[in-house]
Amino acid sequence: MISQYGGFILVYVATPLEVCEARDPKGLYAKARAGLIENFTGISDPYEPPGNAEVVIDASKVTPEEGVQRILSYLEEKGFIRRR
């Protein structure tokens, strides 16, 4: 369905649970661990990473800027965009 509009690229921003918890400004992970939020992904609900992502970025090892550059490079390589 999406091919008529261009294409679809699956980008997986892999972030370890510990990093998600450390970066959680709303304290949702702490609330989930305390049982205040049910079915919270990664805590009481299993998380299944995609197995077929075209681009995988480990957010614990690269800056947001580096991640963006990886995505842009992939899009350029595949002909979706042209950079100057």
Image: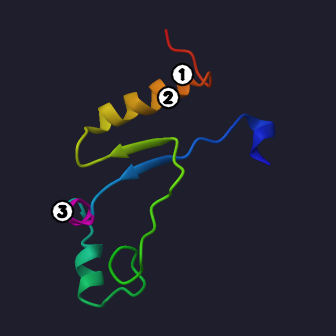
Q: Which residue is mark 1?
A: 77
Left or right of 48, for residue 30 = left
- Amino acid residing under circle 1: Glu
First in sequence: mark 3 vs mark 2: 3
Question: What count of labels does the image hold?
Answer: 3
Tag 3: Cα neighbours inside 10 Å, few (<14), some, or many (≥20)? few
Label 1, label 2: how far apart the Cα atoms are: 5 Å
- Amino acid residing under circle 3: Ala
The residue at 25%/38% (across/down) is 63
Q: How is the image coloured?
A: rainbow
Q: Is residue 19 magenta?
A: yes
Left or right of 24, for residue 83 = right
Q: Find residue 6 and report its image quarter.
A: top right
- Amino acid residing under circle 2: Tyr
Q: Which residues are magenta?
A: 17-21
Label 3, label 2: how far apart the Cα atoms are: 29 Å
Q: Which residue is mark 3?
A: 22
Label 3, label 1: how far apart the Cα atoms are: 34 Å
Tag 1: Cα neighbours inside 10 Å, few (<14), some, or many (≥20)? few
Mark seen at residue 44: none
Tag 2: Cα neighbours inside 10 Å, few (<14), some, or many (≥20)? some
Q: Magenta region, mostly helix, strand or loop?
A: helix
Q: Find residue 67 and report its image quarter.
A: top left
